[in-house]
Amino acid sequence: MSQIKIFDTTLRDGEQSPGCSMNLKEKIEVARCLERLKVDVIEAGFAIASPGDFESVQTIARTVKECSVASLARATVKDIDCAWDAVKDAADPRIHLFIATSPLHMEYKLKMTPDQVLARTSEMVAHAKKYVSNIEFSCEDATRSDTDFLIRVVDAAIKAGATVINLPDTTGYTTPDEMRRMIEAVIAGVPNSDKVEFSVHCHNDLGMAVANSLAGVLGGARQIECTINGLGERAGNTALEEVVMAMHTRPDIFTEHDCRIDTTQIFRASKTVYNIIGQNAPLNKPIVGVNAFRHESGIHQHGVLANKKTYEILTPESVGVVIDNIVLGKHSGKHALASRLKEMGYELDDAELQRCFEEFKVLCDKKKSVTNEDLVAIVTHQAAANDEEDVDGYKLEWFAVHTSNMTTSTSVVRLSLDGQIFEEACSGDGPVDAAFEAINRIMRPVEHTFDVYNIAGISPGKDTMGGVTVKLTCDDRTFTGRGLHTNIVEASVRAYLRAMNKLRAYAAKRQRTNPSR
Ligand code: KIV
Ligand code: ZN
């Protein structure tokens, strides 16, 4: 039985896609989920991209103990040195360097000849090898490269010391059959191919990333690169949950392959990532969508009642989805809450459980029954609120909004800071805009961009809580605030205030360290 290694790049390829940027605490939260999932490698970022990226790769390298931690680097001395600096404290550090090998990329992007690319490959892999033995080398745009040239580059990389060879479908262009043939051809063509592991890294532009990755495995690849929820550049990357569950569900095809992922942690990891980026899974998203285990049509329901296997190829429990047969409500105690959370994979300490229980009770007064989706939102929201306690700042005293479809919306917001009260009245385009304007007038933020305002219903029904995510950016840093409430204006106000307090704390620190700004 050969092990398929799971290389997760949510924090690098996933995080670099629009709307998915995360701050350090969020990245650490994702890294912890990945460790619980038992991925083999966490690509924690692209250390040279910015000081913030360096800091997060380094922090994750120092935090994670159970998996290898990698940083991406272009094939340059500066990138490799920086990547090594960031990962060197990891239990099992890896440098992942890449260079493009397709004619298009070499001519127009790199402005290098094939021979120069070949020489650079040998030099840079050898340079990285001075630091660490665990070296992954990627031929960017491999699926649009000439196979004979690929073989020469891969041979050079192996000779210089690479231990993992990744052949990415950078543009999501290939098909399963083509992918399998490419991997087979390179493995057959390179003399020392049995001394290294081959890897696939697929993008989903044509919706084939998972299929292409699996085809790569059948062709001989032993590592799959993927992201939680398939996040990633453009249409995303191979979704971890899909590719892992495909191998798990079809042992007849993947007879000789296994991976060490704890599939019961999949749902939790997916939810955590969706909550952080302020999105919900599309209803029909495989494995983790709300409808993934629902049977609506009469014929299907009838079949499932007679025998689940008629329409269910995998069980919700296998991916950590707990079906709420016993509905929690206002008569449920802390014990019932703790045991449901435990079933769902959340082990909380006493203080965390107490805070969640309080929020649960408040919610029970507003909703008849509290669903598992609500519980996940409460736990995630509590974790974020704890982080935010580190940030001193303005507190919400109260707010009032007036809105109609005939008049301009107005708001009054009262905030306090160190015992002082501040109040502003504003108008705006809708109640949220009016309330945000009043907060702006009180807090007078430094220059920033308002990147994301996202509102997502947490569970079915009109009494659902709204989960609001706000993301602001300043100096390449992201400041995220989340709010959770059955009143969406309140959820929005709280989310905005949290993001603004983080921005304010950062601006004050920046002013202290660099008073000229
Ligand atoms: O898609 C790609 O080619 C990449 C490489 C840098 C591995 O992300
Ligand atoms: Zn990629």
Image (spheres, rainbow, N blue to C red):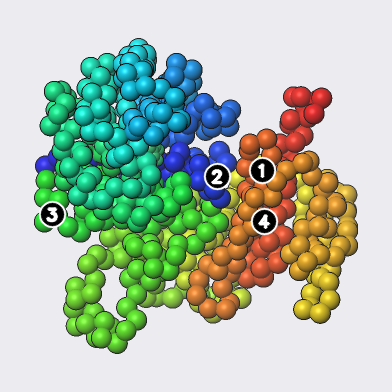
Identity of the residue drawn at 82% across and 48% down: 443
Residue 410 is left or right of residue 76, and the answer is right
Q: Which residue is mark 3?
A: 253
Give how far apart the Cα atoms at labels 2 and 4 are: 16 Å
- The reply to whether residue 266 is visible in this rendering is no
Between 70 and 174, the one nearer to me in the picture:
174
**Label 2 close to label 3 by CB (< 8 Å):** no
| Residue 21 marker | 2
Residue 101 is left or right of residue 309, and the answer is right
**Label 4 close to label 3 by CB (< 8 Å):** no
Q: Which residue is mark 1?
A: 473
Work out whether mark 1 precedes mark 2 in sequence or the reverse, and give the earlier one. 2
Work out whether mark 4 precedes mark 3 in sequence or the reverse, and give the earlier one. 3
Q: Quadrant of residue 491?
A: bottom right
Give how far apart the Cα atoms at labels 2 and 3 are: 37 Å
Q: Which residue is mark 4?
A: 495
Give how far apart the Cα atoms at labels 1 and 2 are: 10 Å
